[in-house]
């Protein structure tokens, strides 16, 4: 199959309609077999559960063209596992893990012409999601649901290299103790929109959220986990029941330990120790690692020794190693890479 006539190297990180998407419906207590369809529109009741009470969960992963020309996806089993946890928390039916992976594979296969070529810096972003689509007026779960997967080719998160960003300590709370911060629900991202718009208006790239209970511990940003590096080269990631279990962060932890031989600590990170770290990064599907050069805490500024020009040396090694695994330049741990073609 030939590639679409797209300027791959100048793609932004946005939505481009592709040819096919996967759709499966849950009705009368069971999921149907699902199918690939061309129609990208959705018709639902004005009283649908997703519209009234935000009953929706989602995932995000990517398909890559490797150095050898294969089309692969990265650790989809973990996305299936996380979607299951998210669905259970919002009283939604679980979409079976094996069917999740099969649906992702079918959708990528059907849109092979949109998978960017190796070396372009672009990838095929994959968005599986589920929502309540039957009418609900009382506060209760919907009875019917739809699971869908669409794809869109996206450019690199960074244009011209991964330059360090400046973030602020937010006055808002991202997630309450015992809340929904550890699942990938649409409602978590809706509440972060005002905070990120405000941060951008103030000249910052992102927010750092502290724990809601004490506001003394680092949690995450609106859409990424934190990763710190100590001055003696130890990798430290915050641990909390209200942090989303990032697949990228978990993969970077394994890379640090098993590929780079670094010491790793997953623990509570207090904000007052952040000034003592040598490097800081935000990790997630979109950018792998976004280096942070500066944190502004209501006028008190923390400047990391790694500076505002380039990634810190340890962060760069982590980034290069994980992207090398994803792009087929380095051997992957067993089970990390799902080959599509």
Image (cartoon, helix red, strand yellow):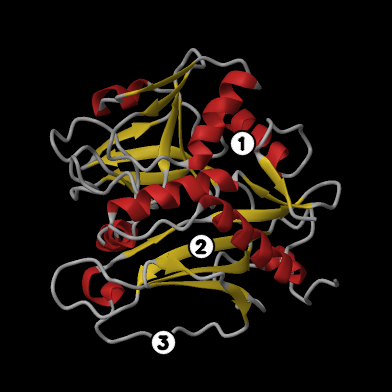
Residue at 60%, 62% in the rendered image: 103
Q: Alpha-carbon neighbours of circle 3 within 10 Å: few (<14), some, or many (≥20)?
A: few
Position above or below: 24 against 222: below
Give the distance between the C-alpha atoms of the residues marked 2 and 1, in whole angstroms: 25 Å
Please report the residue visible at 78 percent of the width from the left and 77 percent of the height from the top.
5
- In the image, taking residue 47 as reference, residue 102 lies left or right, namely right
Q: Hey, which quadrant is residue 332 in on the image?
A: top right
Q: Position of residue 138 (x, y in %)?
A: 13, 74
Q: Residue at x 60, y 27 (%)?
A: 255
* Marking on residue 319: 1
Packing grade of label 1 (10 A; few <14, some 14-19, many >=20) is: many
Q: Secondary structure at mark 2?
A: strand
Give the labeled residue for mark 2.
128
Could you tell me which quadrant the C terminus lies in? bottom right
Residue 121 pos. (x, y %): 70, 55
* Numbered badge on residue 195: none
* Viewer can see residue 85: yes
**Which is in the foreground here, disc 1 or disc 3?**
3
Q: Is residue 282 left or right of residue 22?
A: left
Q: Is residue 94 left or right of residue 286?
A: left
Q: Which mark is residue 43?
A: 3
Q: Quadrant of residue 237?
A: top left
């Amino acid at each position: 199959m030939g590639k679409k006539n797209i300027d791959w190297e100048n793609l932004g990180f946005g939505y481009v309609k592709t040819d096919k998407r996967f759709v499966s419906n849950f009705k009368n207590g069971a999921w149907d077999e699902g199918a690939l369809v061309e129609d990208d529109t959705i018709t639902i009741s004005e009283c649908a559960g997703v519209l009234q009470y935000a009953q929706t969960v989602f995932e995000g992963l990517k398909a890559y063209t490797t150095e050898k020309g294969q089309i692969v996806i990265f650790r989809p089993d973990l996305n299936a596992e996380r979607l299951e946890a998210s669905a259970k928390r919002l009283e939604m039916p679980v979409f079976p893990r094996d069917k999740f992976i099969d649906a992702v594979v079918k959708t990528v296969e059907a849109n092979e012409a949109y998978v960017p070529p190796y070396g372009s810096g672009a990838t095929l972003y994959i968005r599986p999601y589920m929502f309540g689509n039957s009418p609900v007026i009382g506060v209760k779960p919907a009875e019917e649901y739809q699971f869908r997967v669409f794809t869109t080719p996206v450019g690199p998160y960074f244009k011209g290299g991964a330059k360090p960003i400046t973030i602020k300590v937010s006055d808002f709370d991202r997630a309450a103790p015992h809340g929904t911060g550890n699942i990938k629900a649409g409602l978590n991202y809706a509440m972060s929109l005002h905070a990120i718009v405000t941060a951008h208006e103030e000249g910052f790239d992102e927010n750092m959220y502290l724990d809601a209970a004490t506001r003394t511990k680092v949690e995450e940003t609106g859409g990424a986990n934190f990763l710190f590096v100590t001055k003696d080269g130890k990798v430290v990631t915050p641990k909390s029941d209200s942090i989303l279990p990032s697949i990228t962060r978990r993969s970077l932890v394994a890379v640090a330990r098993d590929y780079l031989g670094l010491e790793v600590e997953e623990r509570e990170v207090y904000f007052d120790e952040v000034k003592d770290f040598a490097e800081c990064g935000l990790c997630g599907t979109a950018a792998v690692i976004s280096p942070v050069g500066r944190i502004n805490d209501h006028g008190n500024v923390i400047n990391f020794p790694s500076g505002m020009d380039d990634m810190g040396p340890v962060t760069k090694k982590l980034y290069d190693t994980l992207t090398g695994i994803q792009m087929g330049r380095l051997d992957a741990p067993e089970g990390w890479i799902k080959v599509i073609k």
